[in-house]
Amino acid sequence: MNTLINLQGKRGLVVGIANRQSIAWACAQALREGGAELGVTWLNDKARPHVEPLAQELGASLCLPLDVEDDAQLAAVFEAIAQQWGQLDFLLHSIAFAPKDDLHGRVVDCSREGFARAMDVSCHSLLRMARLAEPLMVNGGSIITMSYLGAEEVIPQYGMMGPVKAALEAATRYLAVELGARGIRVNAISPGPLSTRAASGIAHFDQLLQDANQRAPLHRPVGIADVGPLCAFLASDAGQAITGGTLYVDGGLHLLN
């Protein structure tokens, strides 16, 4: 157990585990090591065989399907939390999506439909989850999402996800203000380039990763294991005075752009 971060007695939902390379997986491990009880979700039947064994490793109390484009599934997840736990202490939102044709093209050329879907899955889903989580966070809580430097700087090949992540960070700030009176903190974590399945959809990602490793002040690769402890800290009472921020885990790369 992680003795530096105490999550004993806390229960939280982790959304976004796809495999062992997922940021959400590293975060879930850190949360569990801190003593938290977890619920996890899988995207669809294709993902389920990869996620269920990981949920078992975590000793997850809840393991449910969740495609955030399906309102019924989203409602069912939070209803299950209400029925089994009666409350929620933290929520990790670690999902993003953009249609490949729109992602690989110029931002100015992206389709209306593609942009709307990317915004819905990657940003508005956070608002929907927060709305459902709010009444369950009876003792306050922590909501955490994942962003990227492309939200505030133009990153070559990141394309339309830049504006989408910018909206996500803005949503984080607004949620922090609106939910703060209930003791609910909302923060975004912005890791450097990470070798995940989601990142593989970005054109020339290997070059982006190499450049980041060379330019970042710490001159070392950043991995998913670097993100997990920060997530656990933000979920814990140790982070109870931190809200509305974007916290970087990128070896200092954001200082140079």
Image: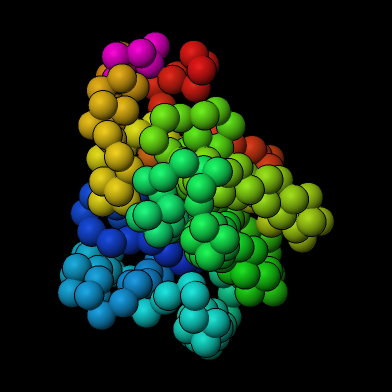
* Among the 4 quarters of the image, the one containing residue 54: bottom left
Q: Is 20 above or below relative to 156?
A: below
Foreground of the two, 152 or 88: 152
How far across and down, in percent of the image, does residue 96 sit? Answer: 44, 56
Residue at 33%, 43% (x, y): give it: 202
Q: Residue 38 lies in magenta, yes or no?
A: no
Q: How many marks?
A: 0
Residue at 29%, 14% (x, y): give it: 214
Residue 85 seen in the current view: no
How far across and down, in percent of the image, does residue 135 sit? Answer: 69, 74
Residue 19 seen in the current view: yes
How far across and down, in percent of the image, does residue 204 sit? Answer: 27, 34
Report the residue that reaches farthest toward the front.
109
The answer to whether residue 256 is left or right of residue 237 is: left
* Among the 4 quarters of the image, the one containing residue 249: top left
Q: Is 84 above or below relative to 198?
A: below
Foreground of the two, 119 or 252: 119
Q: Is 199 above or below relative to 41?
A: above
The answer to whether residue 198 is left or right of residue 206 is: right
Foreground of the two, 194 or 3: 194
Residue at 25%, 80% (x, y): give it: 45
The answer to whether residue 17 is left or right of residue 102 is: left
Residue at 39%, 21% (x, y): give it: 251
**Residue range of the region highlighted in magenta in the rendering:** 213-218
Q: Residue 214 lies in magenta, yes or no?
A: yes
